[in-house]
Image (spheres, coloured by chain):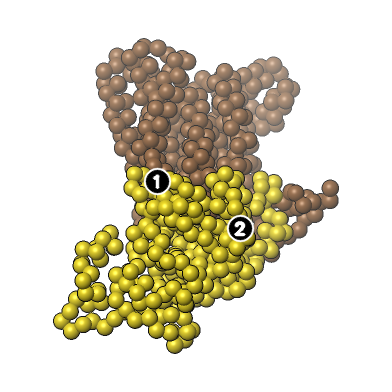
Amino acid sequence: MSDAPLQAREVTLAYDGTVVARELTVAIPAHGFTAIVGPNACGKSTLLRALVRMLKPRAGSVLLDGAEITSLPTKQVARRIGLLPQSSVAPDGITVEELVARGRHPHQRLLRQWSREDERAVREAMEQTAVDQLADQLVDELSGGQRQRVWLAMALAQATPLLLLDEPTTFLDIAHQMEVLDLCAELHGRGRTLVAVLHDLNHACRYATHLIAMRDGAVVAQGPPSEIVTAELVERVFGLRCLVVPCPASGAPMVVPAARAPGGGGARPAGQPAALASQLSA
Amino acid sequence: MSSALASARRPARAHVVRVGETVSLRLRRRPLVAGAALVALVLALLVVSVGTGDFPIGPAGVVKALVGQGDAGTVFVVRDLRLPRAVCALLIGVALAISGAVFQALTRNPLGSPDIIGFQQGASVGALFVITVLGASGVAVNGGALAGGAVCALAVYGLAFKRGGTSGYRLILVGIAIGFLMLSLVNYLLARARVEQAEEATRWLLGSLNGRGWSDVVPLAVVLAALLPALPAAARALRALELGDDSAHALGVRVERARLALVALAVALVAASTVAAGPVAFVALTAPQIARRLARAPSPPLLCSALTGTAIVLAADVAAQRLVPGTTLPVGVMTGAFGGLYLAWLLSTEWRRGRA
């Protein structure tokens, strides 16, 4: 399938004995910027882990370019899909350039440690993420926002057509969140297929071209944000009563939590028991 | 094939050597310089180790005797009496240091070395069991040490690495716990042993090169010759693994398989060295960290660690033989004293940085 380089077909995902998601079917559109959204513990990061074959599905299959992903050589997958994980460890005393260069791992061999292609990819990745000025600095000494750009540069240096990001904006302040998302939009503009797990629904609406909304381990809706994001969907997915209005800056759908009813139960809609909310955040 | 020496963007830091399109090596200056200096130091220590003693031989005489020239007596002393001991020290240093470097990189912690995480204590229990309970000696002791070390390594691995993706801390804590358990077994075995058995056991426990001949060197050399070709691949896997399991996976490394292979490599190396000379303390712990600082590398560099380990064991052995005239101390006493100081320093500095 040329229009969906990566897809999951009826995958059931489980950690040890606990089933987290059942019979998910999603298609990642080529050259799109897909955002996976949903409440905490809805299985969105788990889906991402399955898409990058870090979690083997209990049932169903993940297809990369039409081929069963688990049947492909690991290295070949690593040349097609890059990942920015939620947490990574920078070795003590490593410089920015050295760390970015580690992204070339799947393209290198024992005797081909640093080809001209490696050199070019690393330089471009650092330029695109604007960390080329920091090349000789130690990663330990950078700010959170800079560090996230360096990790992104490492994933870019891997030069994969698909790039998956697991909550790339967590722990960043709002300016740096925007910076990272703008960078993602830029990469998307250059033709990369992006998939990101995002916490903030408004960020997802503003930047993504395709949305996968999940709840309780199931996909509730998929499609372009402008078509699928409605007050009804947000209530169904997050259990939040809200207004959906056009964003004054971008025109994308913007979710505004409903005003607190006087003396009432807050943004939680009437008839939505507290038990459900706690179940969602469990 | 055309050969080209192209320099990278910052020639002071890294040189790239390219041969055609298929071969390109990235060489950093600092590890090269450190490595060359270490090689010179090791060679000098070898000459000192072989040349000094009750029958002193000058450096020129040592070199001549090594290639088989000079009088028969000198050649005999150099080649058959002193060289095996020196070569044994050299190989033990290599094996221990690489084992320590691999464990430290895997656990991302300078304390993650086989002498801290229980392997050597397990080997000690095995050896002592053979000496004191079975009353055997020689090859049987080696067998006991191997079995004890292997059981201990399996226990630590099973407890710390099950369900995959464990943190380095877990391995170290489980290892320390098992290490103490083994230590109490060692003390128990020593307490119930007869005096002469206890004496032999204590000698083994200290780690010694006294009276090592070519028959001790050959098995160790064979193990090293078999395992060392895997080092470049090991180093490559470690560079990815030290970024965290998720990143390593994304870079195309089969995390579980690579980690198991690396642990097996490290355990085999430390086992071979323990069989040859007993549990020589603290080399696996200190050498990789010293090498890391010498090479200014983000993680323990395997080759520089090996050279540093060799230099430490050789120097410790020379000191053990010559420090107290008339007596030859076990090499483990020297590495233990030196390593203890280093460990105290390491813990105090790492603690301040909030890591250990």
**Residue B122 occupies which quadrant of the picture?**
top left
Q: Which chain is yellow?
A: A
Please name the amino acid that badge 2 sits on: Met
Relative to the observer, which residue lies in front, B143 or B308?
B143
Residue A91 percent across, percent down from the top left: 49, 55
Residue B221 percent across, percent down from the top left: 59, 26
* Residue at the outermost bottom position: A248
Secondary-structure class at tag 1 = loop
Task: Identify the subunit bearing mark 2.
Answer: A
Task: Identify the subunit bearing mark 1.
Answer: B
Q: Residue at x 25, y 77 (%)?
A: A267
Position above or below: B59 against A30: above
* Residue at the outermost left position: A263
Check the rendered structure and report the hue given to chain B. Answer: brown
Residue A25 visible in rendering: yes
Q: Which mark is residue A1?
A: 2
Determine crowd level at label 2: few under 14, some 14-19, many 20+ residues with C-alpha closer than 10 A: few
Determine crowd level at label 1: few under 14, some 14-19, many 20+ residues with C-alpha closer than 10 A: some
